[in-house]
Amino acid sequence: MDVRPGGIFLGCQKSPDGQHAMWGRFVYHEVKAPEKLVWVQSFSDEEGNIIRAPFNPNWPLEILNVLTLEENEGKTLLTLQGGPLNASAEEQEAYNAMAPMVSQGFEGTFEQLANYLASQQ
């Protein structure tokens, strides 16, 4: 994980049985510690070459993500915004159709993070 402008993260998620793998890459565009991180996310092969998403041939090749952190009444407010980058009409439509599931996935991930952080106090 090379978190600097132009740096890349290449990662893999595997199914519990190890039979299926899904690679992805982040290319960092802006790093302003500790308040902002901007990156472009893509599905990739294990060498980091951008490929189509395995679940939908119309999924956008690139998703722009902007994460900001700010202090709010003694707590940290995390805001994550994103969407397709250079998408065709079909890619934008595919993204829009999946947006509720993407949002639900992030909610679950942030809930897991909150539970972990609470267990560390």
Image (cartoon, grey):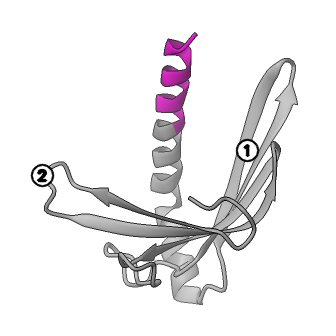
Q: Nearer the viewer, residue 13 or 73?
A: 13
Please state the horizontal and vertical placement of residue 13, each as a whole percent of the image.
33, 57
Is 80 placed left or right of 42 in the picture?
right
Q: Which residue is mark 2?
A: 17
Q: Secondary structure at mark 2?
A: loop
- Is the residue 111 above or below the residue 106 in the image? above
Q: Any magenta on residue 98?
A: no
Q: Quadrant of the C terminus?
A: top right
Q: Residue at x 49, y 21 (%)?
A: 115
Q: Residues within 10 Å of mark 2 (few under 14, many from 20)?
A: few
Q: Secondary structure at mark 1?
A: strand
Q: Which residue is mark 1?
A: 79
Q: Quadrant of the N terminus?
A: bottom right
User: What main secondary structure does the magenta stretch of the protein show?
Assistant: helix
Residue stretch rendered in magenta on the structure: 110-121
Please state the horizontal and vertical placement of residue 5, each as a whole percent of the image.
75, 68
C-beta proximity under 8 Å, tags 1 and 2 = no
Q: Residue at x 18, y 48 (%)?
A: 16
Residue 52, numbered label = none
Is 1 placed left or right of 35 in the picture?
left
